Image (cartoon, rainbow, N blue to C red):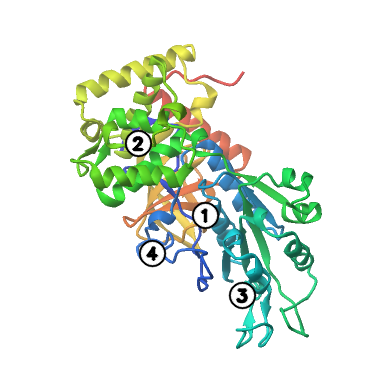
Amino acid sequence: MRRSGHFYRGNSLLPYGIELLHYKPQPQMHSPPKTGTSTNAPDDEALPHSRAGQGEADLVIRSASLQRVMKLAEKVARHPAAVLIVGETGTGKEMIAHTIHNYSLRCNGPLIDVNCAAIPEHLVESELFGYEKGAFSGADAQKPGLFEMANKGTLFLDEIGDLDLKIQVKLLRVLDGVPYYRLGGSKKVSVDVRVVAATNHDLQDLVQKGRFRSDLYHRLAQFKLEVPPLRERPEDVLGIAEQVLRQHYPESSFSSDAVEALLSYAWPGNVRELKNVVFGAVLQAKDAHLEISGADLRFPDSVSSSRRTPAAADLDQVEKRAVLQALEKSGGNQGKAAEALGISRRTLIRKLKIYREAGLEDSSGSLSLNQQRYYRAQLELPIKMKYAGELFDAVLLNISAGGAGTKTEKLLKSGAPVALVFSIPEGASETPAELSGRVTWTNKGGQYGIQFGDLPPALRTSLQRWLRTEMKKDGWDVEMRA
């Protein structure tokens, strides 16, 4: 049985009817003890059933800019290169570091993270490199340093720009693989550690000012990841706000004026500030269990200088985004979406007609090639899935050019390779095709999101041809390649 398709710019891999807003890294097999003020990776990773639901550790990804960063993080994770993560405070640099570890070949080793700015200057060397008994007053026993604790794993150095110049020299030698002495020691220590560093400073500017070593900068920045601030990711603003709200009131929602307020604020404190504002509204709003209004969101006194005043056209876009997101979260069910939006189904249908006509006019009566990338056909098609050498039954719930949503009783591990095996309708061959990819989303209902890998050209062409046929069945004129 077939359902109508949609072409949202949201994640095209979401299974039908699932509300999954969060990026779930591969499970981390080792969770080291906490060190100082650092926070280690959470235990409840995105495994089906047993460990699903990471709470605040989930990283919400809706924006294309952050999706690109995460894809780069996954790619570089498999390489031994040091990684420097750059971004404003509160943008999620720590969770990206955890992702790099979880996708790396060191994922079974320890992940030790430390905030360099939080360690007193006179203790930095002893914390990083350890000390011997009697090295100084109060050193009653030998203590291994953080590098030793991270041996065969990853050491995450947050706020690396605040590290003292004298410590930078020793750090550089260790990164180059040179054995070192513990404080007060006479025996050299060798470690095998992958270093991921993060900073909210412009390290190149600090190098010019003589406050950061040039050679250490280039050693740390073998691969550089820049995390965009939240003000440049409006899609993520709503996703994170919904995440926090649902942790307390799963059935509640934001009113249209609240959505406008969330999208028009610049969020100088990024994710942390957004979570604080929403949490404050949850605690103080009179009807928080039903709805959060714009008046419930308490912004700082400086809000007038940091908020953007949207024009009427921008307000239309805010409304359109809210409507499409409600449809996506309801799996395309117009009745449920209308109820969540607080409008009648007839009003929703009228608005969708306006959006559709506007979209067609913008593309001369057709879906552009770019829009076709986001089309998602809704289906209930019996297929086979190949996983860990086994072939078993499954149901294809939706499919796009980049991935698919499936349902199966078989437990699949997040991040694991998998293949969908079925005959593409109206394809050139009746021989079952094998679309390879990996598991990216999972929920307790046995539904999984699959992201396709590099498909053979002939297979990709056949898939695109089928999707264009589905678009036409939905009433869209499809723009063809020149």
Per the image, the residue denoted by label 3 is 149
Residue that numbered label 1 is attached to: 95
| Mark sitting earlier along the chain (2/3) | 3
- Residue lying farthest front? 137
Give the mark nearer the N terminus: 4 vs 2. 4
- Answer whether labels 2 and 1 touch (C-beta < 8 Å): no
Q: Secondary structure at mark 1?
A: helix
Report how far apart the C-alphas of labels 4 and 2 lie in the structure: 25 Å
> Which tag, 3 or 1, sits closer to the chain's start?
1
Q: Nearer the viewer, residue 28 or 171?
A: 171
Q: Secondary structure at mark 3?
A: helix
Q: Position of residue 11 (x, y in %)?
A: 45, 39
Q: Quadrant of the N terminus?
A: top left
The x, y position of residue 45, in whole percent, is 44, 62
Q: Is residue 177 above or below residue 273?
A: below
Q: Secondary structure at mark 4?
A: loop
Q: Is residue 430 left or right of residue 349?
A: right
Judged by depth in the image, the label closer to the viewer, 1 or 4, is 1
Q: Quadrant of residue 138?
A: bottom right
Q: Earlier in the sequence, mark 3 or mark 4?
A: 4
Q: Distance between the Cα atoms at labels 2 and 1?
A: 26 Å
The type of residue carrying mark 3 is Met
In the picture of the structure, the residue carrying the numbered disc 4 is 51
